[in-house]
Amino acid sequence: MAMIGNDPQDMAELVSKLAQAIDQITSAMSTLDGKAQSVRWEGPDASRFKGTTWPTSKKQLNNVINDLNQVKSVVNKQKQQQIEASR
């Protein structure tokens, strides 16, 4: 018979891995943002980087963080539903 549902322990591990990935991306983005804001660089390329390139990349990283947080919430909800259904 095939299993239907999920293994709550496996789901908890996935939630944990997602949380770690979110923390790593957030930390890297913070480090990079600090350096991008403080780098000594002048001229049109610097203006383009600081005004467009980096903010666009930062927005994309924030989107990844938001997406991963949503995935983490879905996985956690499914884990909880399995626990409740198994009682």
Image (tube, rainbow, N blue to C red):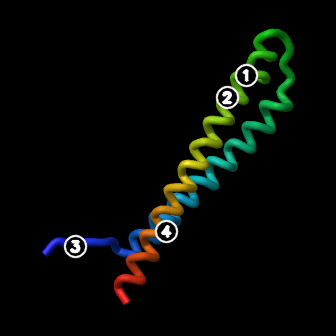
Report which quarter residue 43 is drawn in: top right
Q: Name which of mark 2 and mark 3 comes first in the sequence.
A: 3
Relative to 49, is 13 on the left or the right? left
The vertical placement of 59 against 82, above or below, is above
Q: Amino acid at mark 3?
A: Met
Disc 3 is placed on an element classified as: loop
Q: Position of residue 70 (x, y in %)?
A: 54, 55
- The amino acid marked with disc number 4 is Asn
Write down the residue under mark 4: 76
Image quadrant where one finds the N terminus: bottom left
Q: Position of residue 50 (x, y in %)?
A: 78, 23
Q: CA distance from mark 2 to mark 4?
A: 30 Å
- Few, some or many residues within 10 Å of mark 4 (<14, 14–19, 20+): some
Single out the residue that lies furthest toward the bottom: 87
The residue sitting at 67% across, 49% down in the picture is 26
Residue 44: image location, x then y, percent: 80, 9
Q: Badge 3 is on which residue?
A: 3
Sequence order check: which comes first, mark 2 or mark 4?
A: 2
The disc placed on residue 56 is 2
Give the Cα separation between the discs numbered 3 and 4.
Answer: 19 Å
- State which quadrant residue 45 falls in: top right
